[in-house]
Amino acid sequence: MIERPARACVGFVVDGLPRIEPVRVRHEENRYLVGFEEASMIPHPQSEAVLVVDEGTLFFDLRAVYVRGETRSADPEFEDGVRWIVLKPVRVSSWDYGRMRWERARD
Amino acid sequence: MIEPSVRILLERAMVARLATVSRSGRPHVNPNYFVLDDARIWLGTTTGTLAARNVAANPSVQLLFEVEGDPSDRRLVRMSGSAAIRTDPDLLTQYKRRDARKYFRSLRGLLMSLRNVHRLYLTSKYLTTTDPTSRHCVIEVEPTSIEILEG
């Protein structure tokens, strides 16, 4: 999903309010490169942001990857007409409703 | 009021990405199924989810919608709004009816649901046992501003 994201967006906080931007994504060496279009608002460096990549449109068809991390400057910052930042992951989780199964909890 | 030009795009969207802020000021985003009311967006969830807890603490939200079904149409809708948690039975019933019409009525939706019918119980159980006090709710978003982004 990360290599060929159907939909990707980043959420962050600006002056106490939520902000969401559509983005491009690349995954390299345990970090996520997140690309913003020119007109987009960008999260501050060293701030917390959440990347969500998801696909599917129906019940049991929806799945997603969720990455919570801290933003860093990317080098190069501009490439392919896009401004890139690095998201250093702190927590990564994913879910797929179409693969949900019953499993007894372990002690 | 949602303008007709925006409404047409929202009617073609299937998933809403909801951005919220926690009580301590941390961001959160999650994809949600949604239905369109006359002037509001309804997102189904349970009161124990992080999104619902965030909305209870801070009603400011943003939503992002993509137009589905036409790969050449890359427009997105971004909506800022004020959200509230609704648990009143009448509204939940209305939500469930509209939700079923939207996601189960197509042939693909019906087949997908039949194939996964055994997971309906699991989904409900998962959503309500993550937090035993959790119950079904609707996050109701009243838009304050809407913009169309060219993807």
Image (cartoon, coloured by chain):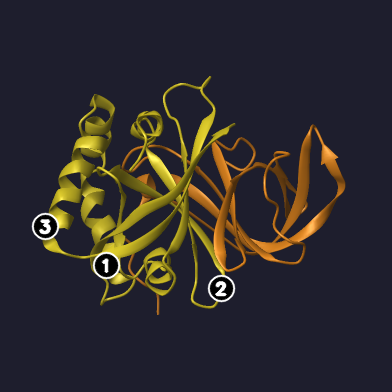
- Residue type for callout 3: Asp
Pick the residue in front: B125 or A71.
Answer: A71
| Residue A101 shows in the view | no
Question: Between B68 and A58, which is closer to the camera in this rendering?
Answer: B68
Disc 1 marks which amino acid?
Thr
Q: Separation of disc 1 and disc 3 at Cα?
A: 20 Å
Image point (20%, 31%), residue name: B105
- In the picture, the quarter occupied by the C terminus of chain B is top right
Label 1 belongs to which residue?
Answer: B128
Q: Please check whether the numbered discs 2 and 3 fall on a single chain.
A: yes
Q: Of the residues shown, which amino acid type is indicated by label 2?
A: Gly
Q: What secondary structure is marked by label 2?
A: loop
Q: Give the colour in which the image draws chain A.
A: orange
For the point 52% across and 62% down, the residue is B28
Q: Is residue A76 above or below residue B132?
A: above
Question: Mark 3 — residue?
Answer: B90
| Residue A37 locus on image (x, y percent) | 70, 39
Q: Secondary structure at mark 1?
A: helix
Q: Are marks 2 and 3 in contact (CB under 8 Å)?
A: no
Chain under callout 2: B
- In the rendered image, residue A85, in percent from the top left (x then y), is placed at 76, 51
Residue B25 is marked as: 2
> Which quadrant of the structure image shows residue B124?
bottom left
| A64 relative to A103, above or below | above
- Give the colour chain B carries in the figure: yellow
Label 3 secondary element = helix
